[in-house]
Image: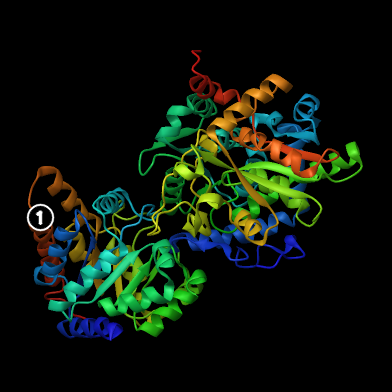
Amino acid sequence: MSKARIDARFAALKAEGRAAFVPYVMAGDPDAAIAAKILAALPEAGADLIELGFPFSDPMAEGPPIQRSAQRALAAGMTLQGVLDMVRVFRERDQTTPIILMGYMNLVLHWGIEAFARDAAAAGIDGLIVVDCPPEEAEPLADALDAAGVSLIRLTTPTSDDKRLATIVRRTSGFVYYVSVAGVTGVKEADEKAVAPQVARVRAASGLPVAVGFGIRTPERAAAIARVADAVVVGSALVDEVAEAVEMNEDVTERVLSKVRSLAKAVRSARVGQLTS
Amino acid sequence: MNRPNDYSAYPDAKGRFGDYGGQYVPETLMPLVHDLDAAYAAAKADEGFQAELGGLLKHYVGRPSPLYFAERLTAHYGGAKIYLKREELNHTGSHKINNCIGQILLARRMGKTRIIAETGAGQHGVATATVCARFDLPCVVYMGAVDVERQKPNVFRMNLLGAEVRPVTSGSATLKDAMNEALRDWVTNVHDTYYLIGSAAGMHPYPVMVRDFQSVIGREVRDQILEAEGRLPDALVACVGGGSNAIGLFHPFLNDPEVKIFGVEAAGEGVETGRHAAAINGGRPGVLHGNLTYLLQDREGQITEAHSISAGLDYPGIGPEHSFLHDVGRAKYLTATDQEALDAFVLLSEKEGILPAIESAHALARLPEVVKEVGKDGIVVLNLSGRGDKDVATVAAHLGRQI
């Protein structure tokens, strides 16, 4: 069921001839209630798929914005159970927008890999990205997710050569995530000229849609990447909106959604007048 | 888990010591980690590399370090003979230099032009800065802001050696956060940077590589004790944070079942208080910094802060081989509190005229039990992994003295 939701969404987008916009938000940032409100409103604001971070104390691949976001969520009491509950509530009203969980291995390990795969599927989660679980360590996780019908979404990077790419895409489904910069989230800027051939390479190796993320902060950058990729992921720029709204005592939900709308609009209009693949 | 017959068979090809170890790192780093694995295997088998390493250990580090019979300490406890492996006499004042020499030669072989490292007490940072100065490579050391504050002399030493020390303020601002930042730097600077990890922890191949470079300690002890006593010791004792000095002493004796092995974890204010750094005695297996090992964590799997008077032991994890040795029962992991370490620090200073590093003082603190366990005719070897000059301000503060 879950994998089907991702496939259906990408098929629909292909028919429309445009890339997907994929906002990343951290579950529980700044607190559970506001994060749930943001999540519920994302599809309406232009999210085609949603990446939902689950907070970890030691997120080694994240830059300062997502590190701080995880800290806020943990300080506000978010748990992995809380994340699943959030998705369950979301699914009561939305059965079509795919949700991909993204986080780190230790929490999944503690839940129990097989139990987590089942519980995630039951909550309505479609895919899972575990940042610190490369193919070398992922066999048990891949087995459990296959059995539960949840996609294991893999990361490919500028350091993945052809041989490595073949290893990475071997047990993946749904889509492949291309990390567009060598670095942590939200620091360096992605360059579409460098990204385009890489996306083509990953697409050819996997036969799957390719999402690009890690260095996209503005509508202009999002539009540029949308011209060459199947999906555009923006995370740090959104969690920065949460941070600033909290600091300025503004409406967090509205600030995040407003940013999502402008990014989604940029992605949707990026290929107008351009031949699509 | 059954005890293996041959401990040299570990880790396996996937970097596992039994269940522990592995390579839980972001994809960006995987090609680098595989390169490192291959480069290390080639270097290890290369006689030229080993000869250069041996020469530097002898002439630059000052090896072999003495194995010293601590006569007055032995008399004090009134039991087994106590020998101290004098790693504190190495250049830079601790065992950390053994590994740094090995890894800097490897980094050069790999053509890397920039070195990064993490440090807790500053001993590994100083050792890394030292080899970077010696081999003319730029060096960035990540250090928790809390540790920068409590180890100021070592920060200045690193600066004198030409290294840039970057204080880390994220998380608990101690060793684990320094390691997170070093990993983030490595992910960002993949093409030219070598990450010189100081502990027998992290992702494969670091635990085995650091163990191999530190095993010079145990190999020397073997020769030295055979010369002094004509037989192997009855027990080995070492402090364990990440556990590099301990595994360096232990490993050459793992296949000698008559040699009892004791690691000593930092119990901080007491394991029962929750404010400690005892990963095995107060933690559970989990994944952090690229490996599966015992970790301090909450019910959910969030990593919790370690607490110890010793910045070098103030880490929520432990090297994966120690987790394995614990599970199979080959080594026993004890604990010592801050106060016990302080008492042992003072005792060794007064009895033997040696100021031990506060890290090593944790191992000294468990001598009464170990001496009792091996009996009056027994022989105990304790790894004095570092010198205590860097800790005098901390010790003075705890003793309520002004300096």
| Residue B298 visible at all | yes
Residue at the location (78% across, 28% down)?
Answer: B70
Q: In the current view of this chain or complex, which residue is farthest to the top?
A: B403
State the image quarter where residue B130 is shown: top right
B105 left or right of B70 in image: left
Residue at the location (55% across, 50% down)?
Answer: B281
Disc 1 is placed on an element classified as: helix
Task: Give the image location of residue A232, x and y in percent.
Answer: 24, 68
A243 left or right of B267 in image: left
Can you say which quadrant of the picture contains the N terminus of chain A?
Answer: bottom left
B30 left or right of A258 in image: right
The foreground one among B401 and A36 is B401
Number of marks drawn: 1
Can you say which quadrant of the picture contains the C terminus of chain A?
Answer: bottom left
Instruction: Give the chain letter at badge 1.
Output: A
Q: Is residue B25 above or below residue A242?
A: below
Kind of residue at disc 1: Arg
Question: Which residue is denoted by mark 1 in the rendering?
Answer: A255
Task: Give the image location of residue A148, x and y in percent.
Answer: 36, 83
